[in-house]
Image (cartoon, rainbow, N blue to C red):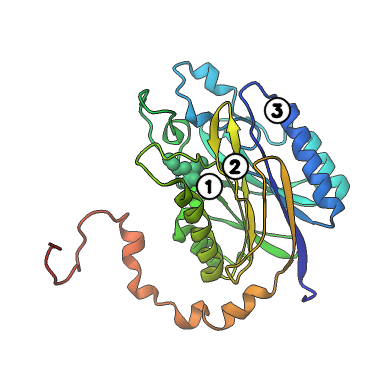
Amino acid sequence: MSSNSMKMAVGQLGPIHLADSREAVVARLVSMLREAAAGGCKFIAFPELALTTFFPRYWYDDEAEVAGFYESEMPNAATQPLFDEAARLGIGFYLGYAELTPERRRFNTSVLVGPDGVIVGKYRKVHLPGHADNRPTLPFQHLEKRYFEVGDLGFPTFASQGTTFGMCICNDRRWPEAYRVLAMRGADVVALGYNTPSHNIYYEEPPHLRMFHHRLVMQSAAYQNCIWVLASAKCGAEDGFHMHGGSCIIAPSGEIVAQTSSEDDEVIQHHCDLDLGKRYRKTVFNFARHRRPEHYGLITESAGGEQVAGQQGGTEPS
Ligand code: CDT
């Protein structure tokens, strides 16, 4: 183990039901924070929208009802005990929550908090899945496009505790561009939280593929970008709506080095060698030597999915 190492944790949350209070959830987070700190960890990643149930599954006509899911300040009275305990124990964390700005804009947000309990940086989810219209015939909905705006902060990185952190939120983990930008900004560690329904409401998908794709995207991203990935689920059945677990810590080799075994509150920990990524960055993924950005322009010029100039040859497959 190199001297440049840090023990890090993932604090997976079991279900949060509609009736659960913020205070009750924060007490669960504090308990996991203490477990991680007692194990010698200096950082713990918590899930996306970690303070409430995954409310985008519900259509609300009444905006006043939706308003109750957002935080207009962070920290606030309910979450202050988590920040205070982090400072007391000297452990940083990642926390996802629904943000309401002073301008009344709504984002799916995460913060990176240092071991002094002070916010180091903020990220607002860029890739919002689902739909914005009411589809009452579905078994449940996925209304992130209704309840949030696309994040306006890009993919920033933050120096903290002698390393560089980046953040993603849930669906971002399926998009290689997110990790690439973070890696190009020097990220050694990418923390991400997620809420992933076990059932795909848009097409028939074998359940095992949900977990397969979840791991596939993060393991390849960790390897291709020479980063540690800390992935934290909110999982189990929230008022009967099931979301998969599978929280894990992934090394820059692409290997899963720790994973949860339950769909409840559970802490996993690993001693992470923060120099491990350097081996890949100097060789196979030496960006400066091997990347060819002059051939990648299309990626930022277009979202894709439409006919683009430069397609060559061939006939339609029969
Ligand atoms: N929260 C979140 O982004 N969940 C998505 C589910 C997509 S299904 C509409 C995910 O990618 O896991």
Does residue 159 sit above or below 33 in this rendering? below
Mark 3 near ligand 1 (CB under 8 Å)?
A: no
How far across and how far down the image is residue 315, in percent?
Answer: 11, 67
Residue 53 horizontal side relative to residue 75, left or right: left
Foreground: 250 or 282?
250
The residue indicated by pointer 3 is: 22
Q: Earlier in the sequence, mark 1 or mark 2?
A: 2
Residue occupying image coordinates x 48% and y 35%? 148
Does residue 218 sit above or below 44 in this rendering? below
Choose top left, top right, bottom left or bottom right for residue 187: bottom right
Amino acid of disc 2:
Glu
- C-alpha distance separating marks 3 and 1: 21 Å
Query: Where, quadrant-wise, is the C terminus in this rendering?
Result: bottom left
The disc at residue 244 is none
Amino acid of disc 1:
Cys
Q: Earlier in the sequence, mark 3 or mark 2?
A: 3
- SS for dot 2: loop
How far across and how far down the image is residue 94, in percent?
Answer: 68, 48
Foreground: 77 or 278?
278
- C-alpha distance separating marks 3 and 2: 14 Å
Residue 33 horizontal side relative to residue 94, left or right: right
The residue indicated by pointer 1 is: 170
Q: Earlier in the sequence, mark 3 or mark 1?
A: 3
Mark 1 near ligand 1 (CB under 8 Å)?
A: yes
Q: Work out whether residue 129 can be spotted.
A: no
- SS for dot 1: helix
- C-alpha distance separating marks 1 and 2: 7 Å
The residue indicated by pointer 2 is: 48
Residue 163 horizontal side relative to residue 299, left or right: right
Q: Work out whether residue 18 can be spotted.
A: yes
